[in-house]
Image: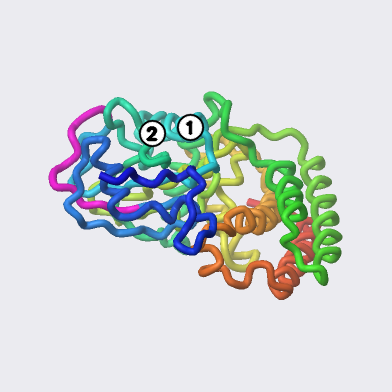
Amino acid sequence: MNELPHANDGSQDKQGNAAHPYEFLTPDVVLDALASVGLWGDGRLTALSSYENRVYQISLESPAPPEGNAGGAGDTVVAKFYRPGRWSDAQILEEHAFAAELMAAEIPVIGALTLNGQTLHHFAGFSFSVSPRRGGRRPELEDNAVLEWIGRFLARIHSVGARSPFTDRPALNIDTFGFASRDILLAGNYLPLDMASRWRNAFEEAMQVAQGVINGVGHVRTLRLHGDCHPGNILWTPEGTPGAGPHFVDLDDARTGPAVQDMWMLLSGDRPQCTRQLGALVDGYEEFREFDRRELALIEPLRTLRLVHYSAWLAQRWSDPIFPINFPWFGSSDYWKGQVDMLVEQTEAMQEAPLVV
């Protein structure tokens, strides 16, 4: 039997170029990895939408054995193969432990199954986990009742998140998302010559304003967060069905930060619409936990930091073949002109009065 290619062995593709590790993650490797933890796929495998990791829905020949939290996994599971080099094992396990803590508090978070006594597994150079499959659709965020429901569960997530800090996973702040992202972009020469100085100037002005807003807010409590709480990471099950309400998925970006980070990405539309949506979220939230309204001033700085971090995220993953295919505009002058324009807009937005609820 031929030896399986290893994700981190510096292998080359057929043209002799350095191959990205995910090029070796074939369907056979996925199924063999699953078999290594005692789960046998029946051959039906579907790749799910994910740029950061590789995620597959896999049908099993028989349900997962009832070990630990694996009971009730059903005949279909979801296997997530973590991007090599992004998180250490300790950081991934910290995410798993947070999810387990949330599930123990009966919060509808979908976490990794315990298989062979572990939640994190290794095969052919890849780190992977297996979780149960849960159905659902995107939440109707125009419905105040839905927003209040989500707010209640966010408060419960944050109550657990405030019990203890992360020790291995990084914080979300102006250094990690702002200046570190700038350093990645400049060191890699990702900005074209005609836009480099304009972007740097827009970035520096935006960070100066962001730091001023942050300083003006003063100390706010930070806690363990979902970290990437946008509508696509909430599965909604309608009332009248088993497990009705929101199910939170993908804690891959869990970090330490202010509570409002898990709220602002659920807002959309003009200022009156955002105010209404935020009001419903906070109403639900405060049924279980007090919300520090000073944090509302952090929404636009956090949005600005995410904007910069997104460009660095694309840059760091450019060697992954799916990125040039799906983001062909990255690196063009038009792209960076758009980034400059958005930074200017965000600089203005950060100087406006914050939302009030």
| Foreground residue among 319 and 355 | 319
- Farthest-out residue, left: 62
Query: Which contiguous range is marked in magenta?
Result: 56-68
Q: Position of residue 57 (x, y in %)?
A: 29, 53
Q: Amino acid at mark 2?
A: Leu
The answer to whether the residues at label 2 and label 1 have Cβ atoms under 8 Å apart is yes
Magenta highlight on residue 49: no
Q: How many marks?
A: 2
Mark 2: give few (<14), some (14-19) or many (20+) Cα within 10 Å.
Answer: some
Q: Which residue is mark 2?
A: 120
- Give the quadrant of residue 190: bottom right
Q: Position of residue 229 (x, y in %)?
A: 51, 50
Label 2: state its secondary structure. Answer: loop
Label 1: state its secondary structure. Answer: helix
Q: Which residue is mark 1?
A: 89
- Give the quadrant of residue 185: bottom right
- Rendered residue at 52%/25% (across/down): 163
Q: Position of residue 85 (x, y in %)?
A: 54, 42
115 horizontally vs 40: left or right = right
Q: Amino acid at mark 1?
A: Asp
Quarter of the image that includes the N terminus: top left
